Amino acid sequence: MTDPAIDHVDAFRASLEAAGVTHETVALGEATAAIERAVEEPTVGVPVHVDASLPASVDTEFSPSDLHAATTGVTPARLGVAALGSLLVPSGEHGDELVALYPERHVAVLAASDVVPDLDAATDWLQSEVDAGRDSYVFATGVSATADMGALVEGVHGPTNVHVVLVDDREATSGDDTTNA
Amino acid sequence: MSSESRRETAAKIRALLDTEGPNIEAQARDLNAGRVEATEAFAEYEALRSDARRIKEDAIERIPELVDTVREAVEARGGHVYLAEDAADANRYVQSVCEDVDAETLVKSKSMTTEELEVNDALVEAGVDPYETDLGEFVVQLADESPSHLVGPAMHRSREDIAALLNDHFDPDEPFESADEMTAFVRDYLGDRIREADVGMTGANFVAADSGTMALVTNEGNARKCAATPPVHVAVAGVEKLIPSVSDLEPFVALLSKAATGQAISQYVSVLSPPVDTPIPDFDGDEFRPADDRAFHLVLVDNGRMAMREDDDLRETLYCVRCGACSNSCANFQQVGGHAFGGETYTGGIATGWEAGVHGQDAAGEFNDLCTGCTRCVNACPVKIDIPWINTVVRDRINRGDDPGRFDALVDGLVPDEEPAGLDLQKRFFGNVHTVARVGSALAPVSNWLAASAPARAAMERVLGVDRRRDLPQFARESFVDWFDDRGGARVPEPGAARSAVVYPDTYTNYVSPERGKAAVRALEALDVHVRVPAVPGSGRAPLSQGMIATARSNAEHVHDALAPHLDAGRDVVVVEPSDLAMFASDYERLLPADAHERLADSSYEICEYVYGRLSNDADPGSLAALDGDVAYHSHCQQRTLDLEAHTVAVLETCGATVRTSDVECCGMAGSFGYKEQYYDLSVDVGAPLADDFATADRVVASGTSCADQLESLLDARAPHPIELIAP
Ligand code: SF4
């Protein structure tokens, strides 16, 4: 995994803001609480990629109708791309793709050490995943949008708002709260 | 084209200028500005364009091998690959997939390739209801129209138009008005369709052969839903979408959205290796079915592409990533949109290549003349396709395919071209403008009086389609070459001169506007340049613009023969008319042997570029005219493509002028285009914003002859070449 220089994480946060995505950076021990703060119920979710459990309010045994009714979906993001503010969301067996797509709010949980500088680095990583047989992801940047109805409208087939819980798993810098809501 | 069909074309264009044009213009210009901003700020842009081009060249070369590779990869994952020979074959396969699962409905994400195949009609025929889920495509489907733009299918419709359409179709309690209301309604409506659909169909922007991984680029998220929700996923892609592997994706992902919309990246770039592992949500039964139940079919479409691959001129079309940048950057497209500037499926400049390749030459013939060869799209294209050349080639083929026998008695033998007898008379006239000008100048002023007479104008309009609202060029009694001889030739002797140059006497400078040439000679001599003005034939620009490639090639050879001794003697070639310089610098690459083209290209300079060069080498600006006050300067499309606008601005400023340029890049005239009866209105519409911009300027100068003609007629004031201001 890329050694995350601190400026990548700063750049990533700036790119998220430019893309209209809110975020909060927390220490690992705070992750569960931060997710809890971020969701609007009803919430469905899938296991995240940091060593933290999902809060009890997140339904992980959901049915398609729960998915349809959910206001928030919680998923892992496997990478963050600093230059673009893109999240790489897996499209795998737990149904991450659906959880990140159907509810109007998407909360993505990302380890700060998984922030890479740019698309080039992300594609390299993706190629190695594909080689290893883990091979379906989506780069999601900002919120779903269209200009097809004669003016720009946010929230079409995908979420209207996106929030990132950035879990600071790097040493010596933890708990700097940079919520922008 | 008969005089009647010219009038029909004019009427159609006039109608679109009033209806769809304004909607297209606002959006296309916006997207174009976005592209310019995004790409200028992007340091790796040029390097990535080269990478993208290289990957495409290699991939198209290797299509047969990549098809085998992707088949293996997809089948290993439990999916199916079908290579469809043509549209009927592809549609039959899709129908059979739907029949196998007793499909009632199918949801689609946006795909131009399925438009090309007319899959929706085939589905309806098989009893399957297709729903377009991209909002723009949905609008076009409801309205039973074809897309007006590669990226924004409903770009021709205003918000009000769309509201009227939806209100009419769905008859809501409260009529829709805002874009928000409409989007919310359609999202819910299509959300229901997606959840209940039996089959999801997507296109694919790229398919990585070695893993069967496809990239889907969207902003709305509908492609993701169409791929992940229904139990059957059918992806339809042209064979040209294959690239070797996922690591080749990077330049395309980095370029596509910037070129298309100016976004750094689109909202969703799915990189999926179907069938995907996402469990299948069965909303009816309210349970998730295992992902293993999901069927996946990749339908790879030939439909003419393998033949395009063998065609040295059309092959480049296959590199196209359908970003729409060529349309957005095109002045004519901005005014009329894809319903005039487009064929059965595809729109904009590159549509000529696609339509000729997949639907046949006739499909391209309808709109191909709307490409004026201005080259503004060339630098916009993320994969560096020479779109004007594809248009020229197809125009040439259409010329040759025309019904022979018409008019031959009238023209054959009268015109010195290399074209078939049946060539459209209007094209033949404008293509042979050099001869017209030579004869006209020899007979001036009688030729001018004659040409201006009302009966002559009526006949020219009827027979040649020269619009009678245009002022015709006035032929000069003494040509530029004759003037130079009469004055006794060069005034700066060659030995001891700082440089030695030939001023190329292009058709207009020579026969219509010798003042431009005389000013060039005066300026160069003032800068200690030994100047010669030999008789050199027309560059071939005029015939090339009419698709008369053989004539253009023979012109190029003659020009080269006439200039070669001067190049041998170490003389530079200085060109006043930017479109002729572009011939030497770019188009001759296609018309002359490589070394001949390179030598001429390397020795050729635009006149103000040359003056700029002399001034940078310590020549005294004081020997040129001293200017003060404002000058409004309009460069030339091809001059901008060659990156030569700045030189003229700098020279004018060095001489003391305050220079203003316009954001409006195109004057609308484009050589002979604006003279043609069927395009007169369009040409004036394109030029109007430029004229507005310059309406209050004291002095307007323009580098191109046709730009000057257009500005002069719209502003009712003379628009000389900048060299005429600069020359002492
Ligand atoms: S030809 Fe080039 S600019 Fe035009 S749509 Fe294709 S890729 Fe884009």
Image: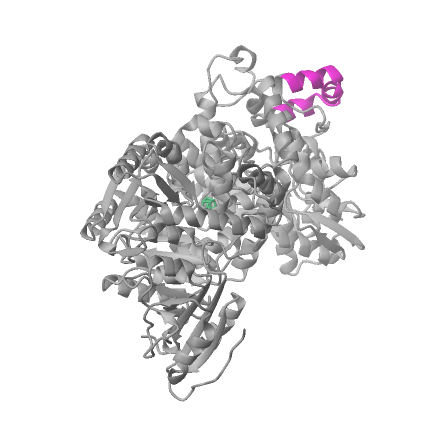
Question: Residue B48, position in %: x, y?
Answer: 42, 58
Majority SS type along the magenta span: helix
Work out which residue is located at the far bottom of the displayed protein and give it: A172
Along the line of sight, the residue nearer the viewer: B280 or B22: B280
| A156 is higher (above) or lower (below) than B563 | below
Q: Quadrant of the N terminus of chain B?
A: top right
A152 or B716: nearer the viewer? A152
Q: In this view of the protein, can residue B147 be seen by the observer?
A: no
Residue B724 in magenta stretch: no
- Residue B319 image offset from top left, x and y in percent: 39, 45
Q: Which residues are magenta?
A: B436-462
The structure residue drawn at horizontal position 58% and vertical position 41%, both measured from the top left corner, is: B162
Query: How many numbered discs?
Result: 0
The residue lying toward the viewer, choosing from B515 and B58, is B58
Q: Position of residue B563 (x, y in %)?
A: 53, 38
Quarter of the rendering containing residue B682? top right
In the picture provided, is B128 more to the left or to the right than B175? left
Residue shown at the point (48%, 50%) measured from the top left: B187
